[in-house]
Amino acid sequence: MENTKTYSIIIPAYNEADTIAKTLNGLKVYIENNNLDCNIVVVNDGSTDDTQNILKQIPGILFINHPYNKGYGASVKTGVAAVNSEWIITFDSDGQHKLEDIKRLIDAKQDFDMVVGARKGYQGPAIRQPGKKVLHKVAEFLVEKKIDDLNSGLRLLRKEHFQKYARILPNAFSWTSTITLAFFKDNLNVKYIPIEINKRQGGKSMVKTSDAVKTLMLILRIIMLFSPLRIFLPASVILFTLGCASTVYDLWMFNISDTTILLFISSILIFFFGLLADQIAAIRRELK
């Protein structure tokens, strides 16, 4: 299959036997009816149901198979590496995304490096929402910008930019959060367009109780990767302020305590550790 189209639609699929055929057949008709210069690339991420056999029977797609489950982000990276298109569109296999939004992304891309569908209304299972909100607030604090949708899986972006950040993108669902922050921190142009998504039409959500811990680790990872000083600097200032207050008290008591010395030393160490972490994070993001 020719894979040098202007756009490549990357669709990760894991145990989506109930929906994948309907999604792909509808997508093929939509592309043809709108004369879109698109490939369809489906990455079967080690499905244990009949997804792989169904994909083998669908013509007109580029089908890539993972021998075992590697993760949503890993599947997207596999799909992107397999094509030569200038633009990448990520699209879900479970029927949540609406076909008409593909053309809306394409029409909105002028002067932008990434266009993201910002979900309105239903945004997925309720169990995910508290962790998402915390992560969202942390992300906005780190980049000092309003982010309309941090985790949306429907997005269009230049392949060259995706490849630049591919090495720091996690293999799980959180690749969307990571690449969003990378674009903002490196001052690339990001646009949001409002979309509505459907409820999952088949399969089942992969959310587990352990995802709360994963979300916490993701928040810490994002802090260290993109804006360490946004955390280390306030901590250093707080310790320094406490040290000054402790000094005033010690002078009143005519005795400089170990606590005061410890507060000042901790403040200095955290400040310089933050500077070092910030430089390491900047170098890591710039490496290709």
Image (tube, helix red, strand yellow):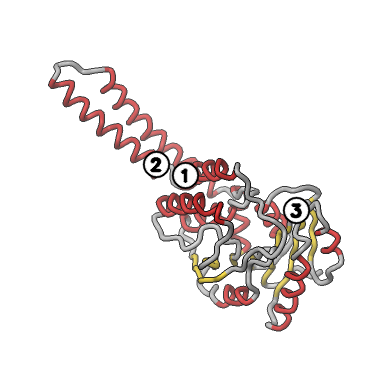
Question: What SS does tag 1 mark?
Answer: helix
Q: Residue furthest top?
A: 255
Query: Splitting the image into 4 quarters, where does residue 55 fall?
Result: bottom right
Query: Which residue is identified by label 1?
Result: 223
Q: Position of residue 56 (x, y in %)?
A: 86, 63
Point out the tag, 1 or 2, that comes first from the N-terminus.
Answer: 1
Q: Residue at x 37, y 29 (%)?
A: 269
Q: Earlier in the sequence, mark 2 or mark 3?
A: 3
Residue drawn at x 28%, y 17% as measured from the top left:
258
Residue 10 in view of the camera? no
Q: Looking at the picture, which amino acid does disc 1 mark?
A: Ile
Q: Quadrant of residue 124?
A: bottom right
Question: Amino acid type of disc 2?
Answer: Ile
Q: Secondary structure at mark 3?
A: strand
Residue at numbered disc 2? 231
Q: CA distance from mark 3 to mark 1?
A: 29 Å
Q: Which mark is residue 45?
A: 3
In-front residue for pair 197/153: 197
Q: Eyeballing the image, is 171 above or below 203?
A: above
Left or right of 251? Residue 12 is right
* SS category of the residue bearing label 2: helix
Any part of residue 259 in sight: yes
Which amino acid type corresponds to the residue marked 3 in the rendered image? Answer: Asp
- Closest to the camera, between mark 3 and mark 1, is 3
N-terminal of the pair, mark 3 or mark 1, is: 3
The x and y percentages for residue 75 are 70, 54
Q: Looking at the image, do the residues carrying marks 1 and 2 touch, with CB atoms under 8 Å apart?
A: yes
**2 or 3: mark nearer the eye:** 3
Q: Residues within 10 Å of mark 1 (few under 14, many from 20)?
A: many
